[in-house]
Image (cartoon, helix red, strand yellow):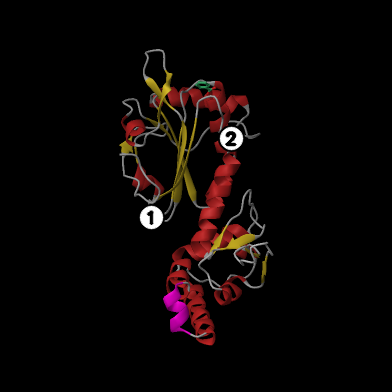
Amino acid sequence: MPLNLGDTVPDFSCDSSIGPINFYEYIGDDHWSILCSHPSDFTPVCSTELGNLQKLLPKFEKRQVKVLALSCDSAESHRKWIKDIDASGYCGPKKDAGVSYPILADEERALAVKFGMLDPAEKDEKGMPQTCRAVFIVDDHKKLRATILYPATTGRNFYEILRVVDSLQLTDEYPVATPANWERGEKVAVTPSTPDEVAQVVLGDFSVVKVPSGKKYLRLAKDPGYKTPKVLKRGIAETILGTEYGAKLLPTVGRLVFAFALGGIFSSGSSRKTKKYTDATTNGK
Ligand code: BEZ
């Protein structure tokens, strides 16, 4: 069964470039992770990708994301290849940095099959299918949050993966969605189920884009990661205040008081994730 968004990513143990590892132990309880497969060691595009991932590792760490790569080559092959990647300069200017994150050695293709990473069009010299360029973005509850699947001939853009992580972490904490090509600091859209009063409390002033239909669904607010956060958990805000029932239940003033109260509760530390992500956001890219 392929993994769907929201599914728990199963635990596994595997040999790797840094020795045998267990997935859940490696990522711990408070980190997100990205699992990136590539077709084969000692190939050009894969070398540029894995070097690039190493160069971007501080940016992933800032977002509390652990990086893991995977192919169907052996751990010994990975370790030899890392020296080439390092020498190629793709890891960045610092020499001998190598690839420090683990490259999983899925020689039996057990993980590749489990995660649906095999590309039937790409075969090795023995005629065995190789892994495609997959990325699985997993949150700190071990839930699958996003995936991409590229063919062997197209190298990935890891800035896009960082951008997706930024969007997921921001929208977990605020009732917002990120528009096309959004980058940190740019305007965000208020989610459709968020009443104006709640948006005003949580996000501050927002603008409504005038459209011919007259509908007021295109509401744009500042990236809340860039202002003092009045934190309000989206799930509770939307469930209680965003529903028709919530709107009928509480008159406007009552809803405002309720929203303030919730903001106080969450900003006083009951949301484990809030502080770390907003800190990462305000500390620059
Ligand atoms: C590469 O990484 O360059 C590559 C690997 C497999 C097929 C095509 C390209």
Residue at image position (48%, 72%) is: 242
Confirm whether the magenta stretch covers residue 246: yes
> Which residue type carries mark 2?
Asn
Q: Quadrant of the N terminus?
A: top left
Q: Is residue 119 magenta?
A: no
Amino acid on which the number 1 mark rests in the picture = His
Left or right: 135 in relation to 162: left
Measure the alpha-carbon separation of dots 1 and 2: 27 Å
Identify the residue under disc 1: 141
Position in image of residue 273 (x %, y %): 47, 62
Of pointers 1 and 2, the one earlier in the residue sequence = 2
Q: Is residue 235 above or below residue 155?
A: below
Q: Tell us which disc is closer to us: 1 or 2.
A: 1
**Label 2 belongs to which residue?**
52
**Residue lying at 46% horizontally and 25% vertically, measured from the top left:** 39
> Where does the image place residue 160, in percent across and percent down from the top left?
58, 43
Query: Looking at the rendering, which quadrant does residue 114 occupy?
Result: top left
Seen in the picture, residue 198 relative to 22 is either above or below; the reply is below
